[in-house]
Structures are given as structure tokens and as C-alpha cells.
């Protein structure tokens, strides 16, 4: 996989190095618990999210934010889908997707054009491209609002959390579209 350091000068923002260093020693168990709750809530609010995968429903996808010290594995199995945090992506995945965390989050929400990111080498996809396209279509059809999904986990702090997260996301995306010239997907 190519890294974003090889990307053109119009690359999207990365997490600050100090924040990356602070995240490196953190244990994955608390993140794993949060991811499990996130996935259960997401599938409860969007019960047909994985149906759009069709024949790719049993595939395993690796998601590697290039500016984080961990990655994610999505097992889109029909019986018990899983979202796991790992230090390194395992071998044997059906497909892997790699980009900065800002790019990945914007892609999930449909706020940036994945094709443009891929052609500018800010997004790297390896493995079963057809499965990745099916995943992208499933996510696009669901119209996910990650800020809202994450805020839903915050219980009584959901509204303030949503405002804070939305302001942070919008600020990052404004700087992204201003500095990189990338246009929103829709």
C-alpha cells in the first residue's frame, strides 16, 4: 500500500503527530467495546445496511487509517457482523482500504468523491474491488451521518456531543475542500 506521504501536495489533513503518538500506547479493548456498541446501534437504526452487499455479504474488509496506530476489520457476515480494532491488518482479507481518517470518515458520509481521492493517490484500495464497490453502495444507500451515529452512543450527552462533533467535522471538511481542491461527492 502506498502511504499518504507519497500523495501529492494537495493531500487531505492528517491527525497531528502529537495526537498520533498519544494514541499509540492506548489499549484496543476500550475501543473494541465502543466499536461493538457502535455497530449494534448502527445495524439497529439501519437494519438493511449489509443487505446491499449481496454476494459479498460474507467478505472481510480491512480499513487502515494511515494516520492512526490501529486499523479496523469489518466482517460483513450474515449471522453476526463484526467490527474489530487491530494494530495491523491481518492477511487473508478480501479487500483493504487505506486513507487518512478524515478522508475515510468523509467518504463514509458521502462528503468526498472516492474516485478523485483514489486517482490522487490519497485512497488506496487493494483486493476485491467489486466487494469494495458493493460496500460503498451499501454505505451510500444508508445515508449515514457518522456524527449522529456516534452521538447516539453518548446517551444524555448526545445533543452536545453531536454539536461538538459536527463542528469539528465541518471545520476539517472546510479546510479539506479549501486546501485540497477536492469537491464533495454529492
Image (cartoon, rainbow, N blue to C red):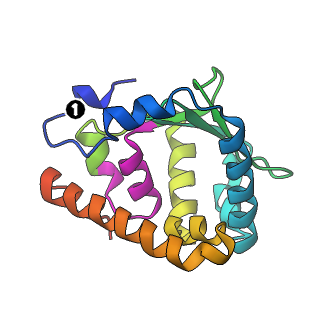
62 or 148, nearer to the observer: 148
Q: Quadrant of residue 5?
A: top left
Residue drawn 65% across the image and 31% down it: 27
Residue furthest out toward the right: 79
Residue 123, compared with residue 55, is above or below; it is above
Residue furthest out toward the top: 91
155 or 166, nearer to the observer: 155
86 or 95, nearer to the observer: 86
Residue 74 vs residue 99: left or right? right
Quadrant into which the N terminus falls = top left
Instruction: Tell me the SS state at disc 1.
Output: loop
12 or 15, nearer to the observer: 15
Residue 124 shows up from this direction: no
Residue 131, compared with residue 20, is above or below; it is below
Label 1 crowd (10 A; few <14 / some 14-19 / many >=20)? some
Q: Which residue is mark 1?
A: 7
Q: Quadrant of residue 15?
A: top left
Residue drawn 26% across the image and 45% down it: 13
Q: What residue span does the magenta drawing correspond to?
A: 98-115
Q: Position of residue 160 (x, y in %)?
A: 51, 76
Residue 100 belongs to the span the image colors magenta: yes
Q: Position of residue 85 (x, y in %)?
A: 64, 37
Residue 48 shows up from this direction: yes
Q: Position of residue 120 (x, y in %)?
A: 22, 40
Q: Quadrant of residue 175?
A: bottom left
Residue 20 belongs to the span the image colors magenta: no
Residue drawn 49% across the image and 40% down it: 129
Quadrant into which the C terminus falls = bottom left
Residue 181, compared with residue 109, is above or below; it is above
Residue drawn 55% across the image and 61% down it: 139
Q: Position of residue 61 (x, y in %)?
A: 61, 38
Amino acid at each position: 500500500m502506498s502511504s499518504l506521504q507519497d500523495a501529492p501536495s494537495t493531500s487531505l489533513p492528517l491527525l497531528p503527530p502529537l495526537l498520533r503518538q498519544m494514541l499509540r500506547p492506548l489499549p484496543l479493548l476500550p475501543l473494541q467495546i465502543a466499536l461493538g456498541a457502535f455497530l449494534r446501534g448502527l445495524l439497529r437504526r439501519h437494519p438493511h445496511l449489509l443487505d446491499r452487499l449481496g454476494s459479498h455479504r460474507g467478505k472481510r474488509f480491512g480499513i487502515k487509517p494511515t494516520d492512526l496506530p490501529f486499523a479496523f476489520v469489518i466482517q460483513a457476515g450474515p449471522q453476526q457482523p463484526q467490527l474489530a480494532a487491530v494494530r495491523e491488518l491481518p492477511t487473508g482479507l478480501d479487500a483493504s482500504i487505506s486513507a487518512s481518517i478524515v478522508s475515510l470518515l468523509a467518504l463514509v458520509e458521502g462528503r468526498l468523491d472516492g474516485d478523485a481521492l483514489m486517482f490522487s493517490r490519497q485512497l488506496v484500495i487493494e483486493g476485491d474491488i467489486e466487494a469494495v464497490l458493493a460496500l460503498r453502495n451499501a454505505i451510500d444507500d444508508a445515508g449515514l451521518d457518522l456524527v449522529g451515529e456516534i452521538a447516539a452512543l453518548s446517551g444524555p450527552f448526545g445533543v452536545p456531543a453531536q454539536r461538538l462533533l459536527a463542528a469539528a467535522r465541518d471545520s476539517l471538511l472546510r479546510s479539506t475542500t479549501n486546501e485540497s481542491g477536492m469537491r464533495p461527492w454529492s
